[in-house]
Amino acid sequence: MPGIDKLPIEETLEDSPQTRSLLGVFEEDAAAISSYINQLYQAMRRIYDAQNELSAATHLTSKLLKEYEKQRFPLGGDDEVMSSTLQQFAKVIDELSSCHAVLSTQLADAMMFPITQFKERDLKEILTLKEVFQIASNDHDTAINRYSRLSKRRENEKVKYEVTEDVYTSKKKQHQTMMHYFCALNTLQYKKKIAMLEPLLGYMQAQISFFKMGSENLPEQLEEFLTNIGTSVQNVRREMDSEVETMQQTIEDLEVASDPLYLPDPDTTKFPVHRNLTRKAGYLNSRNKTGLVSSSWDRQFYFTQGGNLMSQARGDVAGGLVMDIDNCSVMAVDCEDRRYCFQITSFDGKKLVFILIIWICTINNISKQIYLSENPEEIAARVNQSALEAVTPSPSFQQRHESMRQSWPQTARTNSSGSLGSESAALSALSLDSLVAPDTPIQFDIISPVSEDQPGQAKASGQLGRRTNPFGESGGKKSETEDSILHQLFIVRFLGSMEVKSDESPDVVYETMRQILAARAIHNIFRMTESHLLVSCDCLKLIDPQTQVTRLRFPLPSVVLYATHQENKRLFGFVLRSSGERVESHTTSVCYIFESNNEGEKVLPCYLHLFQI
């Protein structure tokens, strides 16, 4: 190393300006050393703190890897290969953690201790001596000034002695302090080199020792193990990239296909309703009563599970039972504050009103217990196809009867072939062929049977198209029926009618109700004509509430069967038996289905009472 610059201690007594100038250079160098050493100390402190943090983090990582097999992950928690691999990593990292702990101790002793001693002891000593020298120099200057002001004419021995003694003391103090200060500054030139080189030497030696411990403690098979793990990671990465590409393509395809479905009312011509479902899930708005007359709509996720309708709140793990929809009835209803509403009525009378009409077909299929068969969607398709073929836009009863008579032989041949197998047998049982023929048309509009089947009687009696007072009061000529005072009026809505094969059991009415409601749901027929049903002692009249015109007239002796729905008591129906026009010995039975504002059971006692009279 080159020579070390020094301050001349021999010249401290003289305290010349040159000496003071040279002292200023050494003081400036000491300040620069102090600033640089502070920065170097902060850097080394960060290394030491980082090493301590690395040692603690490595130990924590090893601990967490060991606890992996104790974790219970919802997905992939039983991967034994992953568990054994992480255990192997934990063992290696635990060894590294021990090495890091040793390295932290060596850095504290060999790197941080020397530079801390230089910073806290040597540099502070220089600052302290500088302050003491500055005070001593100022005191000497003050004493010299006082001595120089002694009067030559008036000599006071006592004052002169005091001033002389003060000069002696201050000069001695300045000289001694200056010598020690010069000595500390000269020593600093050596210490600054030691203070920078010794911590670096300790750091390097600690790192070399750390690497040696790592190479000695780590197993020889570690390199092969790491190579195998690296290959596995690359394979997983390639698989992930391929899966991400597939998912991105799926997302693009779904975005294009689902764009029209974002609309609240998608075009049914482009996206037809699937009517053969036996399972359905999605969000529905259900109506809940909040008071005697007030109600609110709550949006919740609903799904079908077997014969049950379930609901599940967002965030719940599992759903809860809402109602049993086996043998339930479902129909579209009109709501003042919502569109596309339907109502489900269970076998125990529980009712729920929802929004979204697509659910009706699925719930109808579930109510028939089609989901219990081996091929539920195929059977549902056949049942719905039968319902579609059963609904014909025939404008009159005459055309409907002719189409039915033409379909009887074909139906008989179909039933006698016996080649449909187990699925055909299940379908036959579900359609109740013994009660209602599967190809029977359904009449949704009100067409008077009197005007078509008995035209002569209608013209003679003048029943069709005539205004009738529902309370038996008329200003003109009164007939025998109009003179009757035994009558009762009900507000009803006509749902539909169809010919039945039997009129001896209420099951005929129940099955007719089911087929008519299902057909209305399938064909989105929601409008129902409201009328007044007048029950008198000799007939049932369906009267237009606006014009008071009799729409239909049913002779009471021809009404052979009456029944209300088992769950929805507002639904009722009756069977009308009449003789055929072309075949005198052949009689036909037609079932009419209505919905009343009141319970249908209130119409039944009135009908029986009047019939007995």
Image (tube, rainbow, N blue to C red):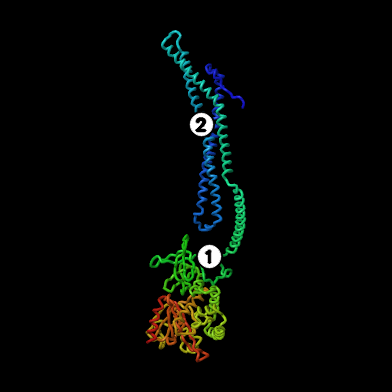
Q: Is residue 344 above or below residue 123?
A: below
Is residue 468 rendered to the left or right of residue 100? left
Q: Nearer the viewer, residue 275 or 298?
A: 275
Instruction: State the residue at coordinates (49%, 54%).
Output: 70
| Pointers 1 and 2 in contact (C-beta within 8 Å) | no
> Which quarter of the figure is the N terminus placed in?
top right
Rendered image quadrant of residue 556? bottom left
Seen as rendered, the residue at the extreme top is 153
> Which quarter of the figure is the C terminus placed in?
bottom left
Q: Secondary structure at mark 1?
A: loop
Q: CA distance from mark 1 to mark 2?
A: 78 Å
Q: Nearer the viewer, residue 7 or 591?
A: 7
Amino acid under disc 1:
Pro
Seen as rendered, the residue at the extreme bottom is 584
Q: Earlier in the sequence, mark 1 or mark 2?
A: 2
Residue 264: mark in rendering = 1
Q: Is residue 532 above or below residue 304?
A: below
Is residue 450 rendered to the left or right of residue 601? right
Instruction: State the residue at coordinates (53%, 73%).
Output: 376
Residue 183: mark in rendering = none
- Residue 192 in view here: yes
Tell how many labels.
Answer: 2
Which marked residue is nearer to the observer: mark 1 or mark 2?
2
Kindly identify which residue carries mark 2: 117
Q: From the top left corner, tell me how far across and down residue 551 is, in percent.
A: 47, 82
How crowded pointer 2 is (Cα within 10 Å; few <14, some 14-19, many 20+) is rated as few
Q: Is residue 487 above or below residue 27?
A: below
